[in-house]
Image (cartoon, grey):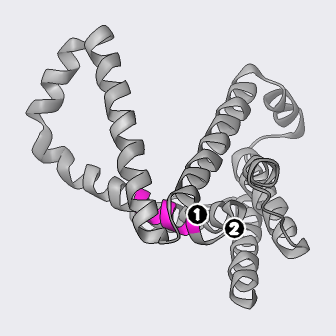
Amino acid sequence: MLQVAIFGLIFLGEPLGLPAIIAVVIGTSSVLGLSFAQHDRITILSKLISRSTMYGIASGAAFALSTVGFKGATVSLSSDYLSAAALTVILAQLFQTLLMSAYFVRYQKDLITKLCKKWKQSMFVGTSGACASIGWFTAMAIEPIAHVRTFALIEVLMSYMISRRFFREQLTTGQLFAVAFLTLSVGMVTMGSALD
């Protein structure tokens, strides 16, 4: 989220007010807290400087840049944000499909056959993902990216509720605090957007 906020400011000129900045920092810290809640301090420090963490940060930066690019493309198309968001989603998914298909043809030809055989089972998931993407792109066309990405942390809360309800997973004290602060950051973004 911090990367999205920074790139949004640099490339799109989306300034954030103090409440939104605090919400982004709280949300980012909460996600880190959830990741490291079950580790001791020495383990946390070693994980923070590990190669896998560096790959994660690089992947997050690439995702943040793509998010900023999608928003830039959406807002440059037209003043009708619904049509612009829908067109951007279609073009983005078409481009992703072409790239993945080329990769499969080059490196995993047998996988294409398997995918074609399972098209009925994947239809619901694919449709759900496409609808979610339309929602993301529409939200980003209306609100600053940092607001949307911070509010999106509600999915972390939902996944914890589902895991507790259906899988009987228990949260540690540290995770409970992280979830509470995550809820606070989502609430701050929601209230801030409502007051704007």
Q: Is residue 111 above or below residue 18?
A: above
- Seen from the viewer's position, the closer of residues 165 and 130 is 130
Q: What element carries label 1?
A: helix
Residue 85 shows in this picture: yes
Q: In this view, does 127 lie above or below 36?
A: below
Mark in the foreground, 2 or 1: 1
Residue 132 percent across, percent down from the top left: 40, 60
Indicate yes or no whether the magenta region holds residue 160: no
Q: Is residue 71 above or below residue 95?
A: below
Marks 2 and 1: CB-CB under 8 Å? no
Sequence-wise, the earlier of marks 2 and 1 is: 1
Q: Give the range drawn in magenta.
A: 133-141
State the quadrant of the C terminus. bottom right
Q: Is mark 2 on a helix, strand or loop?
A: helix
In terms of image quadrants, where is residue 176?
bottom right
Q: For mark 1, does the 10 Å Cα neighbourhood hold few (<14), some (14 to 19), or many (20 or more) residues? A: many
The residue furthest top is 106
Q: Which amino acid does label 1 sit on?
A: Met
Indicate yes or no whether the magenta region holds residue 138: yes
Residue 37 shows in this picture: no
Q: Mark 2 points at which residue?
A: 147
Which secondary structure is most common in the magenta stretch? helix
- Work out how far the residue at label 2 is from the one at label 1, CA to CA, in angstroms: 9 Å
